[in-house]
Structures are given as structure tokens and as C-alpha cells.
Amino acid sequence: MSQAKKSVFARTALTQNGWENDVLVEIDAPGRIGSVVPESKVAATAYTVDILLPAQANLHSHTFQRAMAGLSEARSPAGRDSFWTWREIMYRFLDILDPEDIEAIAAFAFVEMLESGYSSVAEFHYVHHQPGGEPYAQLGELSERIAAAASATGIGLTLLPVAYMQGGVDGRALAGGQLRFGNDFDRYVKLAAQAEKAARSAGPDADFGVAPHSIRAVNERDLKALEQHFRAMPFHIHIAEQIPEIEEVQAAYGQRPMSWLLDHLPVDERWCLIHSTHMTAEETRRVAQSGAVAGLCPITEANLGDGIFDGVNYLAAGGRFGTGSDSNIRISPSEELRQLEYSQRLRDVSRVTLSVEGKSCGRTLYDTALSGGAQALGRDSGSIAPGKWADMIALDVENPALLGLTGDRLLDGWIFAGDRQAVSDVWSAGRHVVHEGRHRDRDAIFKTYKTRLASILARI
Ligand code: ZN
């Protein structure tokens, strides 16, 4: 493969200056972009591609849920299925996973992320302990497994160990599968230190942040203490995903969760508000003005029946967003953006809803998610520009969804008519991990995943 080739020549590329032709991108030793020169001659030493784009960051993932795909789509005997009946299945599923399972699933999910066009991921990692809640001998064992999977696959990791302290906003105790998540504040700080060490060992570009699971799972005192203790790093939280959650918080705190959060915590650029599905007009405006990133996961939100994000008003108010693969039932950045746009079209009986002047819909979606994703991960990426991590993807000009298209229409073709098969190459911080559409270690990682999955399904 092209390990020796530390420059990429693209016939067309979306750089910091827009679409340019015959672009030579030099990658320096740590994996950052050294120079970007348009109108270049083909260099014999360069790896040549047709279409080069900045790669998306996946801002929200629970990798273990990848192995649940297909297990939660049968109607339950109890009646109406919902997020909450799905959550029961998810809790039972995670309660049978061992550390080898968790590492194998994470590695395969990371391979699929890379092959579909993500270069990096924020793993919102909440399974910390053994079934029943007893910690592993090494408190950060499962964080180390996630970091090992990232290191083996070459994906850029921002590891977010999750703080989960209570079973509901009323302070009830953890139960069932939740016992694997729980830590009080002091033990969480110890676990976070081990997770940070593991994360930073995954690569020079790897990073670390903190994730209180939700307002349901962390009370006001601990949420404020976490915010005080972990400064100057990404801070992610699930919020306003489900209507019963909003009613629960409103009953306990007298306010909707998003309004309560904005009134009680200093929400700013380091915050990523996962889902933000159900917002009032006032909340939409306030989140947009806060500088925080709305962490949208449109495929999972559709699968779980969460609801529709207020995207049109949010974008008009200058709001920032990125996308995440969340439950990983389907991993594809282009399809996340398509689902986001289609949700708005279906609700508004309209077309081309998320688009700013001078850019097509696909370009608007792609650009907004690039900068929002990089901000949410605390990652110096999101554009092909000198000094940024070399997080890039190449698209195959022969893919049927792209034939004959140029400029922004390439993104429109990929997002609305294509899928991950259009992705030929992927670099993460200069690591050329996907070549001709396949991850460099796909076969071995798939084989391990297949074996572990068979064993997991036999235990259910
Ligand atoms: Zn989530």
C-alpha cells in the first residue's frame, strides 16, 4: 500500500478555499497537512485520487450497540414499542458482553466507520464494570479495550468515559444493566484518569473528554462538580431526546431539560448536546447562540422513534451541528446527512431545507457537519488546510452516484444518491487506513467479530 507516499494528488479537491483542481497535499510526519498546492503537476511520488474531501468526525457512538442491529425490530407482546422498550433490550444485551466482546465489536464498528468516510470518532463509553456492578481489577479495563480497538484500526479517537450516577432524575438507585455504568464522583475521577491515559496512548491525535450521561443520570450537584473538575476539554451530554424524559425532568426541576441546562451550567463551545430533538423555539435560539454543537444522530433517532430536530430554525439562527452514528445500526456519514435533510422535508412538505445562500444542500450539510464534528471532538480537523490533521477521504469518480457531476453537485450526488461504496480511500491523521474501499485489516477484524458475535448470540 502507500505507507511510503506522504503526499496525495487530487484531480479535484474541496480545500479551505473551496473546489480546486490538480491539488497536491503534503502530509508531514506526525500526520498533519504540511501544504496544499492547487494547479500542481502530478508528482510521481504522490498517491493519486479523483476527488478529495475533508473527512467527517463521528461525534457520537456507542460501539457495542453495533452488534445489536437486527435484534430489536420485532413487536413486543406488551403493546406499543418505544425507545424505552428498546432500552430494556439494550440493557439485557450489554449485560452479557465481556471485555473481549466489547473490544471486537468496537474494532469492527471502527472499521465500518472508516470505510464509510469517518476519520475520527467520539466514543461515548458507558459500560465500565462487570455484570452486577463489580469493577474490573483494572478500573479502566473497558476504556483500555476501546482505546486498543481504536489503535488497531487507526481511527482518530476522542474517548468520552461516561458518568452515570443514578437510575432517574428522582435519584433512584441503578438497576439491572445500569449497574455496569455506575460510579460516584470520586471513583469516576479515578476511572477518568485511567481512561485519559488509555485514550492518549491510541495515537498522537487521540483526545479525551467527559460525558455526564444525561440530566436523568447525574444530579445537579455532581453535574456542576464535573463541569468544574474537567475544564478545557470536550463535554458531551444526552439531552431532550424523548418526550417522557422531558416530562420527568420538568416534574422534578420545574423546567424542560434544555432550558434547565442553559440556565444552570455554562454551556459554550466545548459542549456537545447530543440529540437536542425536542426544543421550544426559544431553546432552539438559545442553543444556537451558545456556540455549543448539537450532536445529531438522524439514523438512530429515526430507528428509535425519537422525533425530528428543529433544523431549519436552528440553522437560520446560526446553530452548529455535527452527526453521530450513535447506536451504529447503520454506519454512514453521507446517509446521516440525507436522513437529517429528509426529516425536515417530510415535516415541512418542502425541499432543499438545510441550505445556505451560495451553497447547495449537500455542501451546506457537509460543511456544517465538518466544522461541528471537529469542534465536538476537540480535534484539529475538518478542512484540507495546512496545520490540520490529515483527515481526508477520496471518492471514486466511477461510482454511479457521482458520474458527470462537479463541484457541490458531487456532494449532492453522494449524499442523496450514494452510500459508502463511493468511498475509495480514507486517511486519519495521515494514516492511510482505507484503500480501494477496504480497511487494511478488514479481513482479520471481521473474522474476530464474526466469531465473537456467534458466541454472543448463543448466550442470549
Ligand atoms: Zn447516545
Image (cartoon, rainbow, N blue to C red):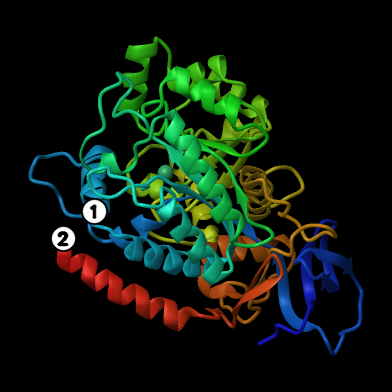
Report the quarter where the C terminus lies: bottom left
User: Which residue is labeled 1 in the image?
Assistant: 93
Whether residue 333 is visible to the viewer of this picture, yes or no, is yes
State the residue in front, 105 or 426: 105
Dot 2: element: loop
Q: Residue at x 44, y 29 (%)?
A: 185
Q: Which residue is mark 2?
A: 460
**Nearer the N terminus, badge 2 or badge 1?**
1
Q: Nearer the viewer, residue 44 or 171?
A: 171
Residue kind at label 2, given as amino acid type = Ile
Q: Position of residue 377 (x, y in %)?
A: 62, 47
- Give how far across and how far down residue 343 sits, in percent: 46, 44
Q: Which quadrant of the figure contains the N terminus?
A: bottom right
Q: From mark 2 to mark 1, how far is it between C-alphas?
A: 7 Å
Kindly give the residue lying farthest to the top in the view shown: 254
Above or below, comparing residue 271 to residue 208 in the picture: above
Q: How many marks?
A: 2
Question: Taking 228 as reference, is 121 above or below it?
Answer: below
* Residue at x 47%, y 68% (from the top left corner): 112
